[in-house]
Amino acid sequence: MPVYNFNTVAVQALFDGDGKIVALNVDQVEVATPNYDGDGMPHFSGYPGKGGYNYDENHDAVMDGTIEPTDESFLEEVASWQTKRQRGDGYQLGSGTWTDEMNAFEAFFAGKTIDEVEAWFAASCSDSNGRPLKITDKSSDEDKAKFDALTPDEQTALADLTASATMSLWDAHGDILTALTKSCENARATA
């Protein structure tokens, strides 16, 4: 049975009169089918009466049966969903927890306008995966060329950021960049 997931990104942002980010809080809910082999991932087994999904109870990549959702199990499952911040230390990434990395991005974006954030993203993140450029021997030629086009100061700022934040801001696991842009658009519309 196929694995699917969905993501919802929530942004709370405060902008000053010049459109610069004063305060920022980003969180996200990611939910997958119970046959997704990821410990701690919130699951959605389907709607009651609509068939069930295979599940992997102990996350060993071996399916342990099929879940047939009931009204009660459906409500329990949805009530148990946690955001990535709520998952805390259980949501580890390359440079720390999801929360640690997002906090680093929030601090990095403070004082910038959305246009500046988008320009930084276009210049400093990979076009293939939305991650900040961190050049290694395995980096693509396109990423290396993009990194080489940055000024030495931009390269240093990027190296400082990627010491604590390397996750994607735009990929199949969530479009954080667009959510931030929409937050600014909504703030402008209500100003």
Image: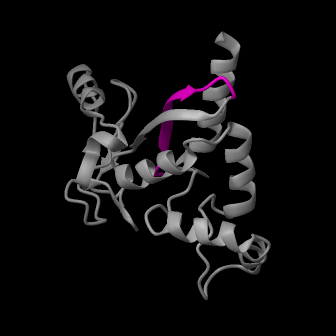
Q: Position of residue 36 (x, y in %)?
A: 37, 54
- Residue 164: image x %, image y %? 43, 64
Q: How many marks?
A: 0
The answer to whether 171 is drawn above or below residue 159 in the figure is above
Q: Which residues are magenta?
A: 1-18
**110, 27: nearer the viewer:** 110
Helix, strand or loop for the magenta stretch, by majority: strand
Residue 116 placement (x, y as % from top left): 71, 45
Q: Residue at x 22, y 27 (%)?
A: 76
Task: Identify the image quadrant of residue 143.
Answer: bottom right
Q: Residue 53: x, y in percent?
A: 36, 43
Q: Is residue 159 left or right of residue 77?
A: right
Up/down of 154 relative to 11, above or below = below
The stretch drawn in magenta includes residue 98: no
Q: Hey, which residue is sitting farthest bottom in the picture?
A: 137
Residue drawn at 61 percent across, 84 percent down: 138
Q: Is residue 184 above or below residue 149?
A: above
Residue 73: quarter of image: top left
Here the colouring is: one colour
The answer to whether residue 4 is magenta is: yes
* Residue 159 horizontal side relative to residue 58, left or right: right
Q: Residue at x 60, y 71 (%)?
A: 156
Viewer-closest of 138 and 35:
138
Q: Is residue 171 visible?
A: no
Return the residue nearer the eye: 69 or 112: 112
- In the rendered image, which quarter contains the C terminus? top right
Q: Horizontal placement of 133 versus 68: left or right? A: right
Residue at coordinates 26% horizontally, 22% vertically from top-left? 75
Residue 90, visible in the rendered structure: yes
